[in-house]
Image (tube, helix red, strand yellow):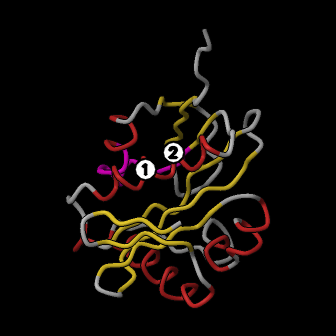
């Protein structure tokens, strides 16, 4: 993956991104009063190879002027047949409100669909109001079965299309 949105570079995760990506996510969680859980919900950020790359998922980095400013990822899950969960969509405050979240979500959806997955799940917290609005305005339907303790919302979107 290597794409541009305005002057942002969206690219595949590299090993040198482990700590900077974790710091972006920790910082955003802290901003919203949510805890960083390196031995729980955030373990995947520190073990990208195991959670994403080895399972058929992807972890992307968003850079602006050679600085890591955001992340986005997905990996296969067992909630439903041929499903993935979008995870770790976080942006530093300085790059929010520029359409980057919507663009990243669309790129993730395209990548997921191109790999033949049938549904996308997303967990989030109500306090992340911009994220909730983004998901709801892009066709994600409220569901039940939150699995992450700091989250209180779960959404699903079907990628199945009707064939003629």
Residue nearer the viewer, 103 or 157 = 103
Stretch in magenta: 122-132
> Where residue 51 appears, x then y in whole percent?
73, 66
Residue 131 in magenta?
yes
Vertical relation: 2 (above or below) 120: below
Vertical relation: 132 (above or below) 17: above
Looking at the image, which residue is at 68% across and 39% down? 117
Q: Residue furthest top?
A: 164
Residue 114 in magenta?
no
Q: Neighbour class for label 1 at 10 Å: few (<14), some, many (≥20)?
A: some
Left/right of residue 135 with respect to residue 158 in the rendered view: left
Residue nearer the viewer, 68 or 23 = 68
Left/right of residue 18 with respect to residue 21 in the rendered view: right
Spatial CA distance of label 2 from label 1 is 6 Å
User: How many numbered discs?
Assistant: 2
Looking at the image, which residue is at 42% across and 46% down? 106
Q: Neighbour class for label 2 at 10 Å: few (<14), some, many (≥20)?
A: some
Residue position for label 1? 105
> Where residue 81 appears, x then y in whole percent?
77, 33
Looking at the image, which residue is at 59% across and 55% down? 149
Vertical relation: 124 (above or below) 121: below
Circles 2 and 1: CB atoms closer than 8 Å = yes
Which numbered marker is on residue 119?
none
> Where residue 157 appears, x then y in whole percent?
53, 32
At mark 2, the secondary structure is: helix
> Where residue 47 appears, x then y in whole percent?
70, 77
At mark 1, the secondary structure is: helix
Which numbered marker is on residue 109?
2
Residue 6 location, quadrant: bottom left
């Amino acid at each position: 993956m290597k794409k541009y949105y305005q002057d942002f570079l969206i690219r595949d995760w590299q090993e040198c991104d482990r700590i900077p990506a974790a710091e972006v996510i920790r910082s955003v969680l802290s901003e919203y009063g949510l805890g960083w859980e390196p031995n729980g919900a955030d373990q995947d950020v520190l073990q990208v190879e195991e959670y994403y790359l080895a399972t058929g998922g992807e972890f992307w980095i968003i850079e602006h002027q050679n600085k890591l400013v955001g992340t986005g990822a997905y990996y296969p899950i067992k909630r439903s047949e041929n499903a993935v969960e979008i995870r770790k969509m976080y942006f530093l405050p300085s790059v929010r409100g520029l359409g980057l979240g919507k663009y990243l979500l669309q790129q993730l959806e395209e990548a997921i669909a191109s790999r033949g997955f049938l549904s996308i799940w997303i967990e989030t917290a109500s306090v992340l109001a911009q994220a909730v609005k983004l998901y709801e305005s892009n066709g994600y339907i409220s569901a039940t079965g939150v699995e992450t303790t700091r989250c209180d919302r779960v959404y699903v979107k079907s990628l199945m299309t009707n064939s003629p």
